[in-house]
């Protein structure tokens, strides 16, 4: 074990068991999976994605490019960093070969979201962020403080002194003050992963991951906070940058700050024989701390002169310091066993079981970049830092390039900053890589991308780091280039022989860290992802054995199979029943929009291609809506209920779209119109009673209603009542048969349905579903928008030119009808297709082609005349038929075309779209 007594902030009085790669280990509450593995001497956790090389734990938090694991229990999730997975009892994980796999079992955890508004949002609870939050709270502002670690304090280890006491005591005091402030929301384990315009920030809170199986079942596992802030303070710290050298990807190589973090947070000494390779002062603190914990340490400082202050401290601890030294290679298999060094031109090998690297620090300015904040290269830091300010956003502390503790405290508290001991600093050396084989120098360790890959990209003529990123895949892994991005820019600059500031850096985009799709979905998953809507009769349909289909979020009964019937047999039976007797359909899902106001008629005139203002009260009119391009948008019927009131009936799938379309025009283009729109789809249930005996059924169900043609003409409606319940009945037909649509308040839908079934029992009334409805309407040539149209079809193409008014001055889409393309006689037009063999059902979506005059097909690619939009077996015709959109279709009636089916060409004759009762005699019974 590598636990060191007297170090760490975990609870060592309790033990938890976990399994990694089939081996059971123990850890303590507060551990991460990475710290627990390192405590057992496990450095290698997987292999690389391309070369299969061993991969270990390279850092202590989200900047780790290598320590990926698959979690199996207590929640299934692929590709998480071992450094960020908090240890829980019963945790089961395994290492990865570069990439994970999706879970094979459902994730039963709950996820949710919350909206929060505040004056100041502070991201990061390090020294700068804590004091910024405290200052805002003392000003009386509403404050939200989020931080991604388990506890506040950032990189403070406890060895620092602030205001004369250990830094951890100071952190606890500030946290307590914030907790006592009523207008402060402090969220740990919460990562701000994206910043957007107008102070909008998305943050993911890991609420129960650290509780494992002990998590309350009523508590969401993770929560997405949607935070809107007047002012955002970015105090996200910085990421330590490694140096690239040959074989720098071995397990046992990690960032110097990570080894210090593992020691002070978890009491884990990651190695006993330690080499520290640095270009700056910060790594000396790690060297001193690890030596104090019992390690033997050697410091290789790439600068010609080591900083005297740190060198003196090292001499007191018998730590060897070698100025002007560099690591050029490593040895070892599963774990590093030694380093190859060069000092003043002299090569030497040093044994070690842990190599710590520090090439400087990169401000974690990702959130600043998300809102198009510009970064500029600071040659003194060897890093990119925020340049011009962004309104409403402040960047402080290490995120702004202030790396000393005193400076961070000043950034957070201003003149009220607490006192701390200022350490002398020596200028860092900017070093991207050392000498060695470029093919073995890994820039992005997760992607197995090397210096040689960058050389190839530059050699291919690429100059932009954005292009080189995509050519090499550097910075596209889970860590989004946190340790590799700036190094890649530096190496590109070296290869091109130009300053780093001219190459720039790649663009940081959300998310800052990976976010599970389940968390983004929140509660909108499973049935709630796309809510299922059911009619008031759904339970009756289920009991009747209906097979359902999804239409515009609705569950609609598609057909009602009798025992041993397939869909074709059931639909043929239902069609025959409707054409020969009477059938009943649950049409409640049709969209219904109540349009009221003095200008209601004017609004509908502007939106429909035909006149609605001339419609008389008590009458119904079919209408077509077009988009700005003149293409069919939706169709349906309009009932005039009063001089200032209409009921617009839309397709099931188009209901929401049509209402949105109407509201958009009303609110943005014609706000002067005095009209109100209300969806009443759920309020009215609709039951078409269809067939030659439908009049008998309606007369029996409503004995006080005169249903004769004279008293109740086609395309009219009448109100009546049953047992005091208002009922509206309309003479509308989507089948060509005599039909009545019964509308009733949905509270009474089931009673009305049963009443109609009872009234029609003597005529063997047959419930039918949407598939039968489709066949019946297709036999009459009635198109379905969205099935027989594809966004490029005008009313004229569908044979609906009669529904386009020539009297109206204007309506949406009118001008588009005069465009040359819309008057092209070779436009695709709706026609019928009758297979010559009278047996083959043409698959919907099949292409329609034509032979050349010599009876052969043109060479590939064969020109397409059109495609099949609807295809059915017809009980009335005794054969299959189809509808299709065919170029110049109306002028080709009588021609034979061919449709490929199962590798053969099936000849079919083009015909008119009305195949049943072209005279319309059945409509009135």
Image (cartoon, rainbow, N blue to C red):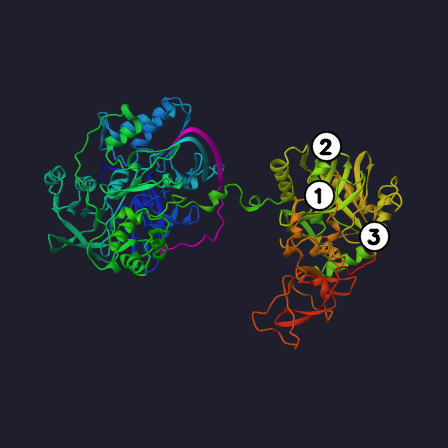
Residue annotated with mark 3: 923
| Residue 238 image point, x, y percent | 29, 40
| Residue drawn at (78%, 43%) of the image | 620
Callout 1–callout 2 Cβ contact below 8 Å: no
The disc placed on residue 730 is: none
Q: What element carries label 3?
A: helix
Magenta highlight range: 96-122
* Of the two numbered discs 1 and 2 in the rendering, the one whose residue sits closer to the viewer: 1
Query: To which quarter of the image does residue 149 belong?
Result: top left
Q: What element carries label 2?
A: loop
How crowded pointer 3 is (Cα within 10 Å; few <14, some 14-19, many 20+) is rated as many
The disc placed on residue 598 is: 2
Real-space CA distance between mark 1 and mark 2, rounded to the nearest whole angstrom: 20 Å
Callout 1–callout 3 Cβ contact below 8 Å: no
Q: Nearer the viewer, residue 50 or 289?
A: 50
413 in the magenta segment: no
Instruction: Please tell me whether residue 57 is drawn above or below residue 289 in the rendered image.
Output: below
State whether residue 411 appears in this view: yes
Residue annotated with mark 1: 809
């Amino acid at each position: 074990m590598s636990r060191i007594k007297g170090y760490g902030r975990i609870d060592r009085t309790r033990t938890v068991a976990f399994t990694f790669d089939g081996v059971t280990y123990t850890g303590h509450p507060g551990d991460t999976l990475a710290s627990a593995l390192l405590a057992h001497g496990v450095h290698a956790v997987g292999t690389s994605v391309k070369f299969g090389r061993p991969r270990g734990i390279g850092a202590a938090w989200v900047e780790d490019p290598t320590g990926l694991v698959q979690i199996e229990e207590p929640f299934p999730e692929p590709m998480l960093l071992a450094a960020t997975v908090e240890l829980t009892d019963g945790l089961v994980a395994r290492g990865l070969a570069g990439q994970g796999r999706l879970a094979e079992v459902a994730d039963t955890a709950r996820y949710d979201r919350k909206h929060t508004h505040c004056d100041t949002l502070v991201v990061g609870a390090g020294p700068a962020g804590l004091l910024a939050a405290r200052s805002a709270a003392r000003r009386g502002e509403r404050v939200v403080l989020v931080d991604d670690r388990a506890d506040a304090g950032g990189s403070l280890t406890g060895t620092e002194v602030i205001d004369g006491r250990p830094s951890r005591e100071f952190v606890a005091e500030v946290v307590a003050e914030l907790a006592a402030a009523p207008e402060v929301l402090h969220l740990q384990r919460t990562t701000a992963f994206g910043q957007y315009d107008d102070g909008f920030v998305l943050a993911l809170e890991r609420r129960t991951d650290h509780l494992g199986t002990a998590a309350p079942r009523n508590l969401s596992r993770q929560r997405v906070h949607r935070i809107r802030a007047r002012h955002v303070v970015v105090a996200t710290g910085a990421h330590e940058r490694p140096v690239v050298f040959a074989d720098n990807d071995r397990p046992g190589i990690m960032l110097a700050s990570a080894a210090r973090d593992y020691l002070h947070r978890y009491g884990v000494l990651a190695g006993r024989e330690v080499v520290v390779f640095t270009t700056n002062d910060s790594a000396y603190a790690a060297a001193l701390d690890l030596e104090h914990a019992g390690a033997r340490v050697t410091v290789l400082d790439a600068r010609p002169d080591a900083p005297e202050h740190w060198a003196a401290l090292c001499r007191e601890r018998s730590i060897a310091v070698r100025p002007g030294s560099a690591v050029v290679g490593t040895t070892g298999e599963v774990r590093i066993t030694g380093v190859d060094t060069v000092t003043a031109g002299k090569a030497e090998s040093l044994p070690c079981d842990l190599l710590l690297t520090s090439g400087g620090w990169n401000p974690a300015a990702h959130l600043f970049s998300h809102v198009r904040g510009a970064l500029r290269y600071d040659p003194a830091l060897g890093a990119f830092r925020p340049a011009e300010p962004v309104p409403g956003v402040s960047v402080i502390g290490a995120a702004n390039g202030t790396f000393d503790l005193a400076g961070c405290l000043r950034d957070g508290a201003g003149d009220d900053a607490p006192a701390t001991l200022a350490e002398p600093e020596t200028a860092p050396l900017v070093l991207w890589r050392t000498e060695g084989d470029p093919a073995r120098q890994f820039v992005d360790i997760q992607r197995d991308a090397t210096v040689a890959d960058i050389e190839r990209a530059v050699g291919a003529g690429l100059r932009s780091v954005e292009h080189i990123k995509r050519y090499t895949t550097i910075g596209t892994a889970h860590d989004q280039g946190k340790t590799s991005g700036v190094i890649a820019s530096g190496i590109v600059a070296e290869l091109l022989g130009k300053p780093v500031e001219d190459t720039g850096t790649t663009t940081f985009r959300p998310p800052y860290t990976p976010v599970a799709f389940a968390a983004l979905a929140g509660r909108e998953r499973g049935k709630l992802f796309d809510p299922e809507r059911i009619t008031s009769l759904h339970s009756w349909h289920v009991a009747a054995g209906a097979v359902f289909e999804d239409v515009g979020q609705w569950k609609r009964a598609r057909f009602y199979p009798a025992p041993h019937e397939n869909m074709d047999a059931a639909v043929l039976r239902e069609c025959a029943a409707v054409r020969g007797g009477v059938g009943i359909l649950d049409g409640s899902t049709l969209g219904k929009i109540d349009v009221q106001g003095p200008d209601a008629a004017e609004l509908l005139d502007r939106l429909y291609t035909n006149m609605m203002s001339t419609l008389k009260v008590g009458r119904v009119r079919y209408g077509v809506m077009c988009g700005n391009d003149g293409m069919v948008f939706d169709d349906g019927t309009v009932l005039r209920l009063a001089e200032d009131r209409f009921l617009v009936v839309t397709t099931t799938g188009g209901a929401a779209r049509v209402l949105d379309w109407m509201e958009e025009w009303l609110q943005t283009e014609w706000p002067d119109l005095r009209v109100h729109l209300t969806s009443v789809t759920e309020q009215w249930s609709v039951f078409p009673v269809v067939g030659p005996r439908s009049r008998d059924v309606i007369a029996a169900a409503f004995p006080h209603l005169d249903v004769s043609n004279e008293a109740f003409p086609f395309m009219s409606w009448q109100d009546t009542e049953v047992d005091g319940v208002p009922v509206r009945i309309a003479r509308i037909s989507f089948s060509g048969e005599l039909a009545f649509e019964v509308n009733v308040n949905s509270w009474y839908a089931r009673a009305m349905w049963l009443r109609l079934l009872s009234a029609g029992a003597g005529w063997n009334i047959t419930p039918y579903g949407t598939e039968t409805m489709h066949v019946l309407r297709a036999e009459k040539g009635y198109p379905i928008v969205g099935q027989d149209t594809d966004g490029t079809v005008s009313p004229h193409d569908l044979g609906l030119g009669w529904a386009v008014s020539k009297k109206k001055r204007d309506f949406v889409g009118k001008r588009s009808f005069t465009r040359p393309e819309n008057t092209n006689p070779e436009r695709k037009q709706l026609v019928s297709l009758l297979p010559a063999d009278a047996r083959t059902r043409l698959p919907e979506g099949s292409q329609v082609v034509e032979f050349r005059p010599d009876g052969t097909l043109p060479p590939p690619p064969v020109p397409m005349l059109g495609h099949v939009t609807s295809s059915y077996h017809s009980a009335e015709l005794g054969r299959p038929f189809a509808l299709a959109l065919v170029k110049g279709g109306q002028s080709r009636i009588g021609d034979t075309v061919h449709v490929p089916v199962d590798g053969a060409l099936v000849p079919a004759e083009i015909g008119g779209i009305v195949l049943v009762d072209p005279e319309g005699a059945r409509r009135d019974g």
